[in-house]
Amino acid sequence: MALSLRHLILTAPKCSSILTRRRVAHFTFFKDQPDPSLGPTKEMNLCQTIQNAIDITLGNDHTAIVFGEDVAFGGVFRCTTELRSKYG
């Protein structure tokens, strides 16, 4: 006995409208103020942040290396573009 799709839809249990209603968050975003005692800061996007972290690590730790496909060309997101000329 094959049940039709229409029969399955009509007999399926109904959810309450409260559970199916999309919830919307109401809040105001306040940006954190950096602590001036930690030194100067600058805004960076994610790729710049990753490149900066790798640059600091390669500069401080002579045993650190970067593995991955296309790292010499900057990787997929071009986060390692200038590091090859700087560190080899």
Image (cartoon, rainbow, N blue to C red):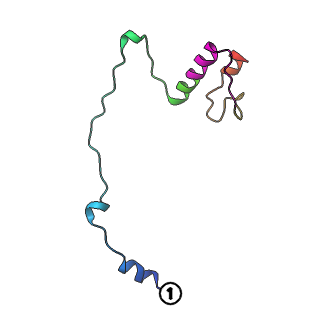
Question: Going 66% across and 20% down the picture, which residue do you hit?
Answer: 64
Q: Residue at x 33, y 27 (%)?
A: 31
> In which quarter of the view is residue 28 placed?
top left
Q: Quadrant of residue 19?
A: bottom left
**Mark 1 = which residue?**
2
Q: What residue is shown at x 63% (from left), y 14% (from top)? A: 59
For this rendering, which residue is in front, 74 or 87? 87
Q: Is residue 59 left or right of residue 73?
A: left
Side of 67 where 8 appears, left or right: left
Residue 7 vs residue 13, the one in the foreground: 13
| Quarter of the image where the C terminus is located | top right
Locate residue 68 relative to residue 39 in the image: left or right.
Answer: right
Q: Would residue 66 be counted in the magenta stretch? A: yes
Q: Position of residue 36 (x, y in %)?
A: 37, 11
**Is 36 rendered above or below residue 32?**
above
Q: Position of residue 72 (x, y in %)?
A: 72, 27
Please tell me whether mark 1 sits on a helix, a strand or a loop: loop
Q: Is residue 1 magenta?
A: no
In the current view of this chain or complex, which residue is farthest to the front? 63
Amino acid carrying mark 1 in the image: Ala
Q: Which residues are magenta?
A: 52-67
